[in-house]
Amino acid sequence: MAEENVGGDKPLRKISEAFKDLEAVLNSSNPGGDVPVADFSRACSLVSPLFGCLGIAFKFAEMDYVAKVADLAEASKSIDTLQAILDHDMEGGSVRKAGSHTRNLLRVKRGVDMVRVLFEQILQIEENSLRGPASTAYAKVFAPYHGWAIRKAVAAGMYALPTKSQLLNKLNENEVSAKIEMQSYVASSAAVVAYIDQLFHSKNLGVDW
């Protein structure tokens, strides 16, 4: 049914195109190829509906992710680039404080990476169940930073995940079109995630906090 779909359009295509644009910025001749905060937050906001499509297992991620993307969008009004976000918070001594733009950037990056791993896993399997791909993505990206209670709640929620066909229906995609868009997102988001990781390491901040 059309009303079950996300926005009635092609959210997966919008996501893949937005991250392709971010990758193009990184590959451009701009000094340092730094990514504008406005462009990054816009691309990340397009990913938000995917968490909603996955149901209760990722409800925590959806709420946390949406709030932090909104913070970065607000920050873009006064801070131009991702590197400038880190510099701004380092100067203010607020890098690791709850609610800092830098801390929120790190957590949004994990959301982007979780979807990347999820798509990677979906592309590698033939079965209709998403439990395996979603469990792998959660274990690899989020689980190391979550306590026992959240991990247990997520594990229980995995049984309420939609099937792959149900997910594609919600996204207005078929197997062929979804594969193309997922492959594009996997490649471009990997480049963006790697850039953000490199940015944190270049400032001696690390990414495991």
Image (spheres, rainbow, N blue to C red):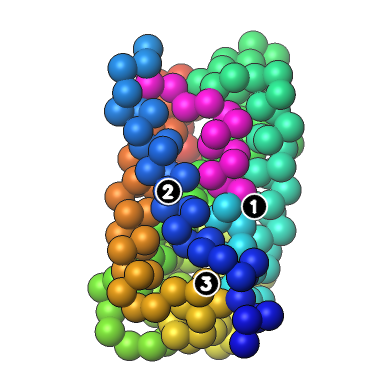
> Which of the 4 image quarters holds residue 161?
bottom right
Q: Nearer the viewer, mark 3 or mark 1?
A: 3
| Residue at 31 percent of width and 17 percent of height | 29
User: At which x and y percent is residue 183?
Assistant: 30, 59
Q: Which quadrant would the C terminus be assigned to in this image?
A: top right
Q: Which residues are magenta?
A: 32-45
Secondary structure of the residue carrying tag 2 is helix
Question: What is the spatial separation of the Cα atoms under label 3 and label 1, in whole angstroms?
Answer: 19 Å
Q: In this rendering, does residue 132 appear at all?
A: yes
Q: Provide the residue designation for mark 2.
A: 17
Looking at the image, do the residues carrying marks 3 and 2 touch, with CB atoms under 8 Å apart? no
Q: Nearer the viewer, mark 2 or mark 1?
A: 2
The type of residue carrying mark 2 is Glu
The relative height of residue 81 versus residue 164 in the rendered view (above or below) is above
User: At which x and y percent is residue 158?
Assistant: 54, 81
Mark 3 Cα shell of 10 Å, populated few (<14), some (14-19), many (≥20):
many
The type of residue carrying mark 1 is Tyr
Looking at the image, do the residues carrying marks 2 and 1 touch, with CB atoms under 8 Å apart? no
Q: Provide the residue designation for mark 1.
A: 65
Mark 2 Cα shell of 10 Å, populated few (<14), some (14-19), many (≥20):
some
The type of residue carrying mark 3 is Leu
Q: Provide the residue designation for mark 3.
A: 171
